[in-house]
Amino acid sequence: MVPVPEYSFLILLPVLRQIYQTLGSKPAEQGGILGIADGVISRFYYDVEGLCSERDYYPDIKSISKVIKEWGNEGVSFCGIVHSHHPSARLLSSKDIDFGRAILRMNPSLNSVFFPLVFSVADNTEYEFIPYVIDEKSVSIASIRFSNQI
């Protein structure tokens, strides 16, 4: 029997397209944040100000905090960070996991943080989206569904 994923997300297709057009078409180690409303991941913000090197992506906390506040005024909550890795790094790094758990500690209303990895066509690989989720005890892969509308 195949285990049922503990976490499940519904993502709007336009959000997935935005991720592909940014993270999925640029060299690895770029990122952004995801927003959820009424149980649907409906927002993506590409972190153009983030610090990107060949090995790491560091979010620009100032710009991301501003976006999260704007989203909050619109009824959208932060639910995760999506970023790209090099094709050989298919798992979340220990830094990724530590950062995800730090987000949870700073946001007690969150039980988990959606932390997908993207692999970019710019890195000579096929585009891929792996829907990792981090909680206080584990890292798992979520079940995801896509929709054109809410």
Image (tube, helix red, strand yellow):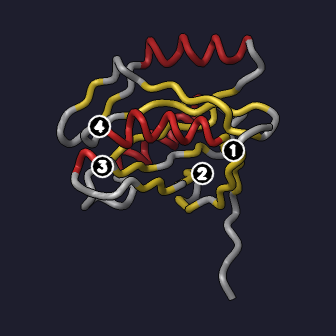
Dot 2: few (<14), some (14–19), or many (≥20) neighbours within 10 Å? Answer: some
Snapshot quadrant of residue 150? top right
Disc 4 residue crowd, few under 14, some 14–19, many 20+, Cα 10 Å? some
Residue 29 locus on image (x, y percent) = 29, 39
Distance from label 1 to label 4 (Cα)? 31 Å
Which quarter of the image is occupied by the N terminus? bottom right
Q: Secondary structure at mark 2?
A: loop
Q: Mark 1 is on which residue type? A: Asn
Q: As displayed, is residue 97 above or below residue 42?
A: below
In primary-sequence order, the first of circles 3 and 1 is 1
Query: Which residue bears the numbered disc 3?
Result: 121
Give the number of the mark in front: 1 or 4.
Answer: 4
Q: Looking at the picture, does residue 43 appear above or below residue 110?
A: above
Which residue is the extreme one toward the bottom?
1
Image height check: is 115 above or below 35? Answer: below
Measure how far apart labels 2 and 4 are at the Cα level: 28 Å
Residue type, numbered disc 2:
Asp
What kind of residue is marked 3?
Val
Q: Earlier in the sequence, mark 3 or mark 4?
A: 4
Residues under numbered marks 3 and 1 in contact, where contact means CB atoms less than 8 Å apart = no
Q: Nearer the viewer, residue 122 or 3?
A: 122
